[in-house]
């Protein structure tokens, strides 16, 4: 038989007064086991007495070991889908999809049934999200961002001189439109053609590629112009008659010019379409052919890239720069 006498007055974690016959670990295990029989318990004066009934020590050890074994079946693992609260950028109809950003992570949001109004908050699930990314969300949300207007352009196409004709963004747009488009591409993390980039490296190198292309184009064009200058004047006005090989140089110069112009149009077309879709900007009602982006890229390329530069940053707060990847200083917050 095994007895335990415990004072129940002034009970505390260290209130065991005395024990006998069984060591404390065995006594505690037997009391916790639901299979150990307790014949009776009684209170005598200020002492609680419990008696364990067992045939022998072997039976007690077998009963105790059986009660402490792990369950044969594993407990099911609970899973949950993380939810994110999104602020509606504009009034959108149900089913409309747009990209939301937290830090360097982008995920697609589908407008729930019934639609949403601008500024409304709603919850969306975040699928395929790693625990590490979820843990970093709180930190990423603390990073300051520049809010870009949604549902409309920040200003008009012809407002290129709103910050003055000598503003850096205006100079870049009119003298180096392709590198200026590269600055917009870097802000939006697109690839060199103005499409969504597959990775950060593809986006990071877009501006350098467009600058290299521009330098190569102007360098070759200057060399060709210097070579062909004496033959560009009509012989009747004192010019020299061009030799046969000069004709091929003139053709090459024309092809080079139109190739560079085509690249500029394609890049601007893609970037402008991406910005309009990203920020839910409708096309001008006067354009019935639904080709506003293409027309702006072809007919108003300099004005179009200047508008994109103004729309994707805050020149009222931060100064523009000409020779940086994003057109602003490195400390300027990114856009949302």
Image: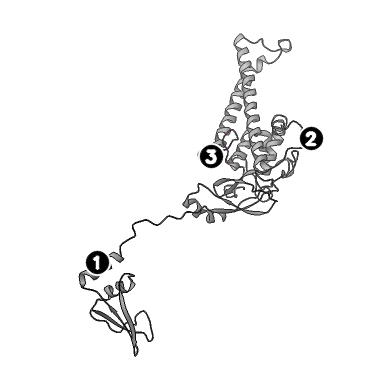
| 225 lies above or below 21 | above
Q: Which residue carries the number 3 mark? A: 204
> Do callouts 1 and 3 mark residues in contact (Cβ within 8 Å)?
no
Of the numbered discs 1 and 3, the one sitting upstream in the chain is: 1
Q: Nearer the viewer, residue 211 or 45?
A: 45
Mark 1 neighbour density, 10 Å: few (under 14) some (14–19) many (20 or more): few
Of the numbered discs 2 and 3, the one sitting upstream in the chain is: 3
Q: Which residue carries the number 2 mark? A: 286
- Per the image, label 1 sits on a secondary structure element best described as helix
Q: Which residue is painted at 28% across and 84% down in the image?
A: 18
Q: Which residue carries the number 1 mark? A: 62
Q: Nearer the viewer, residue 21 or 114?
A: 21
Cα gap from disc 1 to disc 3, whole angstroms: 68 Å
Q: Quadrant of the N terminus?
A: bottom left
Quarter occupied by residue 306: top right
Q: Nearer the viewer, mark 2 or mark 3?
A: 2
Q: Nearer the viewer, mark 2 or mark 1?
A: 1
Measuring from the top left, give residue 53's x and y in whole percent: 26, 76
Mark 2 neighbour density, 10 Å: few (under 14) some (14–19) many (20 or more): few
| 111 lies above or below 222 | below
Residue 325 as seen in the image, left or right of residue 60: right
- Per the image, label 2 sits on a secondary structure element best described as loop
| 248 lies above or below 215 | above
Secondary structure mostly seen in magenta is loop
Measuring from the top left, give residue 113's x and y in whole percent: 66, 48
Q: Is residue 269 visible?
A: yes
User: Residue 191 in magenta?
Assistant: yes
Cα gap from disc 2 to disc 3, whole angstroms: 37 Å
Report the span colored magenta. 189-197
């Amino acid at each position: 038989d095994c007895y335990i006498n415990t004072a129940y007055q002034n009970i505390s974690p260290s209130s065991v007064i005395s024990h006998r016959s069984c060591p404390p670990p065995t006594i505690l295990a037997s009391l916790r086991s639901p299979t150990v029989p307790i014949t009776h318990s009684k209170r005598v004066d200020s002492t609680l007495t419990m008696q364990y009934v067992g045939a022998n020590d072997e039976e007690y050890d077998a009963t105790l070991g059986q009660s402490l074994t792990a369950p044969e079946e594993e407990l099911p693992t609970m899973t949950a889908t993380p939810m994110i609260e999104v602020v509606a950028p504009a009034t959108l109809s149900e089913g409309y999809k747009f990209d939301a950003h937290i830090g360097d992570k982008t995920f697609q949001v589908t407008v729930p049934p019934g639609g949403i109004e601008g500024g409304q908050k709603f919850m969306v699930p975040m699928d395929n999200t790693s625990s590490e990314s979820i843990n970093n969300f709180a930190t990423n949300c603390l990073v300051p961002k520049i809010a870009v207007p949604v549902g409309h352009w920040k200003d008009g196409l012809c407002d290129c001189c709103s910050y003055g004709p000598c503003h850096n963004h205006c100079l870049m747009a009119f003298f180096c439109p392709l590198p200026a488009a590269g600055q917009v591409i870097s802000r939006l993390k697109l690839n060199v053609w103005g499409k969504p980039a597959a990775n950060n490296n593809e986006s990071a190198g877009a501006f350098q590629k467009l600058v290299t292309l521009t330098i190569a184009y102007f360098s070759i064009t200057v060399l060709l112009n210097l070579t062909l200058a004496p033959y560009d004047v009509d012989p009747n006005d004192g010019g020299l008659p061009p030799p046969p090989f000069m004709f091929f140089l003139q053709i090459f110069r024309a092809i080079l010019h139109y190739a560079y112009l085509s690249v500029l149009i394609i890049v601007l077309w893609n970037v402008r379409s991406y910005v309009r879709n990203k920020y839910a900007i409708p096309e001008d009602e006067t354009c019935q052919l639904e080709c506003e982006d293409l027309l702006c890229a072809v007919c108003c390329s300099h004005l179009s890239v200047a508008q994109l530069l103004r729309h994707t940053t805050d020149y009222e707060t931060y100064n523009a720069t000409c020779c940086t990847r994003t057109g602003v200083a490195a400390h300027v917050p990114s856009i949302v």
